[in-house]
Amino acid sequence: MRRRGKFGMSGLPWQDPIWAGCEKHKPIRNGPRWPIVRAGTNQGNKVAKYHEDMTLDEIEELEMSFIDSDHLIYERRGVRYYYGNSFGGGVVGASYGEDTSFIVIQRYQAGHVHGYPETRQRLIDRMRKYNPELLVKFLERFPS
């Protein structure tokens, strides 16, 4: 098994993180009202959306602030998956038809970073599968 850390699974070094954002998760401005957008995250291809009140600068700050070992859920094939939550516990967006204050952040070995809103339960399911130690800390920090 290869070591994690400075070098990824390919043996190449991890590049410095660069925020890339992601068009499909950006807030919808001047479009349907939030309840319709939220409901749409549980239909069709189920694309999570950031809340319409969030600016791109706020999304970048939020996603980039959780790229650290304390928030690492797992690493797989040159991608590290982290979790984060809104500053102050407010709604950051919607996923699977519900408002959420949590996000998943993907950091690629080449440096690109982007995230998306995720439900608390889906985060718990990922942590249970990939990082049970982190799940214990998460549940202590964010009891239901």
Image (cartoon, rainbow, N blue to C red):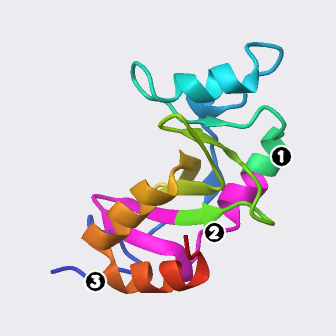
57 sits left or right of 24 in the view? right
Residue 77: image tag = none
Q: Amino acid at mark 3?
A: Arg
Q: Amino acid at mark 2?
A: Phe
Q: Is residue 50 magenta?
A: no
The spot of residue 7 in percent (x, y) is 37, 75
Q: Which residues are magenta?
A: 60-82
Residue under the point 66% across and 55% down:
101
Do the residues bearing badges 1 and 3 touch, measured as CB atoms within 8 Å?
A: no
The spot of residue 132 in percent (x, y) is 32, 80
Badge 1 local density, few (<14 within 10 Å), some, or many (20+)? few
Q: Which residue is tagged 3?
A: 3
Q: Which residue is tagged 2?
A: 66
Q: Relative to the observer, which residue lies in front, 14 or 66?
A: 66
The spot of residue 12 in percent (x, y) is 35, 67
Q: Which residue is tagged 1?
A: 57
The first of marks 1 and 3 along the sequence is 3
Residue under the point 84% across and 39% down:
55
Against 27, is 7 above or below? below
Quadrant containing the C terminus in the rendered view: bottom right
Element at label 3: loop
Residue at mark 1 to residue at mark 3: CA–CA distance: 34 Å
Q: Amino acid at mark 1?
A: Asp
The spot of residue 29 in percent (x, y) is 80, 21
Residue at mark 1 to residue at mark 2: CA–CA distance: 15 Å
Against 20, is 68 above or below? below
Badge 3 local density, few (<14 within 10 Å), some, or many (20+)? few
Tag in front: 1 or 3: 1
